[in-house]
Amino acid sequence: MRGLLAAHRPVLFDVALAVAATILEVGLLFDDNTDPAPLPIAMTVLTGAVLLARRRFGLAVTAVTVASAAAVTAVTAVGFSPGGVPAVVALWSLAETRDRRVSLAVLAPVAVFLEADNVCSPPVSIGAWMLGAYMQTRRRYVQAVEERAATLEREREQLDLITAQHERDAIARELHDIVAHSVTVTLIGVRGARDVLETEPRVAARTLAQVETSAEQSLAELRRILVLLRGRHAAETRPQPTLAGLDELVAGYRAAGLPVRLEIAGEPLDLPGGVELSAYRIIEEALTNALKHAGATLATVRLRYGGADLEVRVHDDGTGPGDPGTRDPGSGGPGSGGHGLVGMRERVALLGGELEAGRAPGGGFRVAARLPIGERS
């Protein structure tokens, strides 16, 4: 129903405008207590009806309304003086709907004619034209603003897509390193098992069991790479960080001026490489945000091993912007691609986990991630 009313709104407005202009013009015809006469009333009603075509035939409607005002003055009995309301409305509509040069060219002769025929004074005609010209300028400005907003929204969506793609590529490169290392370990293990298979079968069996575990993890990481990878990238040769280096990471932030408290709950487990790397990166990005953008005086990092999940929580007491869209202008951490929270979401989504980032109930900013570790050895 609302959409139907919106579609017919211009038509309803034109009808209301034509009716109002007609009633006002008829009232002006008899404002000096002149007795009503059929002919001027009929001519005024017909002129008002012509206003319904003002949007499509602006020039013709202006000419008809001006001619009608002159005709009422010329052919009717003495005492009937038109107010020129339809002509003024037509002039306003012409300035509101047509090119400025066209309406301005029509304004001068129409104003002079209406003044000469004692219909209305030039200030009325000029005022109507100026109102129409202002409304046209205002409408075009609003349209330009809306188009600009739509363009910016499209650009923002494209930038988000590009950023997400960069994050996927960075994660894929890191997983590539893990898989390459695991395959190398597998190859060395198989060769070692083959060498001792006849002389020490137990050692060979134990080695092959380790190779099997490493191969299973490699397959899991390869599946994730296939989900992410959209192009070919050269693998980085530097080793990827692990949670074993978490103490060193925290110490670096403490040295930079951010006190960090590290808490670990549960028995540490052997994690798949992708899970361990993602946990490390999430902590790194969150601490970088707290140090650079939040003005935090304390940050707490909590790791909890339990069941089939690894829980990662980073909470700071910063007073900076807390919305994820404004808090994170780009942490710039290794592998982050300059968009920390986007990278966190991509990593967690890849692993099938959950991520929450935003203002903490007690103040500050909190990042909480749950990473499935069901594929551990």
Image (cartoon, helix red, strand yellow):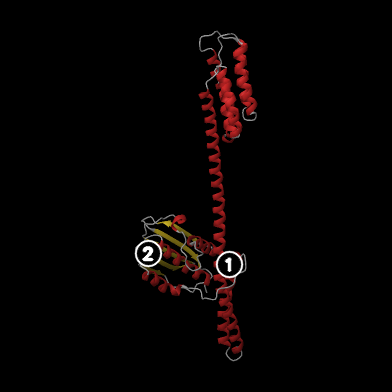
Quadrant where the image shows the N terminus: top right
Mark 1 belongs to which amino acid?
A: Arg
CB under 8 Å between discs 2 and 1: no
Q: Residue at x 63, y 22 (%)?
A: 64
Displayed quadrant of residue 234: bottom right
> 147 and 301: which one is in front?
147
- Residue 306's mark? none
Between marks 2 and 1, how big is the CA–CA gap? Answer: 31 Å
* Of residues 4 and 182, the one drawn nearer to the viewer in this rendering: 4
Q: Out of 54 and 206, give the one closest to the viewer.
A: 54
Residue 144 rendering spot, x and y as whole percentages: 55, 43
Name the residue rendered at 57%, 61% in the picture. 165
Establish if 15 lies above or below 180. above
Rendered view: 201 above or below 116: below
* Image coordinates for residue 108, horizontal then vertical, percent: 57, 26
Residue 16 visible in the shown view: no
* Residue 224, label in figure: 1
Helix or strand or loop: what does disc 2 sit on? strand
10 Å crowding of disc 2: few (<14), some (14-19), many (20+):
many
284 versus 33 height, above or below = below
Is label 1 in a helix, a strand or a loop?
helix
Q: Is residue 195 above or below residue 84?
A: below
Residue on which the image places disc 2? 299
Instruction: Point out residue 263 in the picture as x, y percentages from the top left corner.
Output: 38, 68
Q: How many marks?
A: 2
**Amino acid marked by disc 2:** Ala
Q: Earlier in the sequence, mark 2 or mark 1?
A: 1
320 sits to left or right of 209: left
Question: Is residue 139 among the parts visible in the rendering?
Answer: yes
